[in-house]
Image (spheres, helix red, strand yellow):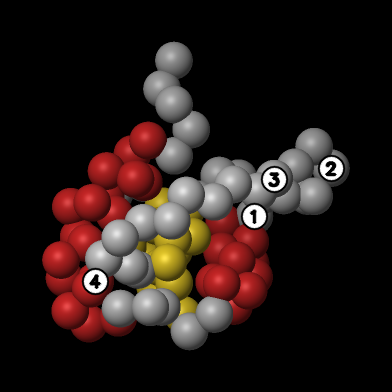
Amino acid sequence: MEETLEQELCTYEAHKAELLSKASGKFAIIKGEEVCDVFDTRNDAVCQGYGRFGNVPFLVNEILEVEIPQNFTSALLGV
């Protein structure tokens, strides 16, 4: 079984240098092999992600040189 968001994390790593040069400190939405968009705030990115994809897994990641691990569970899962 494929790990949740494994593909999205690989996509982020593949595009990290480009994202850092263009949008450091912002938040990227990644679905599958596509970097979909970049936003100024995490909230804007999450809202746009749910609007675009619905209640399915997608990655919102802050574009940083050094990653700070964070976990949260959506209250919308299982609804």
**Residue type marked 2:** Val
Q: Which residue is mark 1?
A: 54
Between circles 2 and 3, the one closer to the viewer is 3
**Residue type marked 1:** Gly
**Residue type marked 4:** Leu
Q: Secondary structure at mark 2?
A: loop
Earlier-in-chain disc, 1 versus 2: 1
Residue 16 — which label? none
| Distance between mark 2 and mark 3 Cα atoms | 13 Å
Q: Which residue is mark 4?
A: 19
| Distance between mark 3 and mark 1 Cα atoms | 15 Å
Q: Is residue 28 above or below residue 67?
A: below
Task: Tell me what residue is drawn at x 43 percent, y 56 percent.
Answer: 68
Determine if residue 75 is in view: yes
Q: Secondary structure at mark 1?
A: loop
Residue 73 — which label? 3
Label 1 neighbourhood size at 10 Å, few (<14), some (14-19), many (20+)? few
Residue 79 — which label? 2
**Residue type marked 3:** Thr
Between circles 2 and 4, the one closer to the viewer is 4
| Distance between mark 2 and mark 4 Cα atoms | 33 Å
Q: Are marks 1 and 2 in contact (CB under 8 Å)?
A: no
Q: Is residue 52 above or below residue 24?
A: above
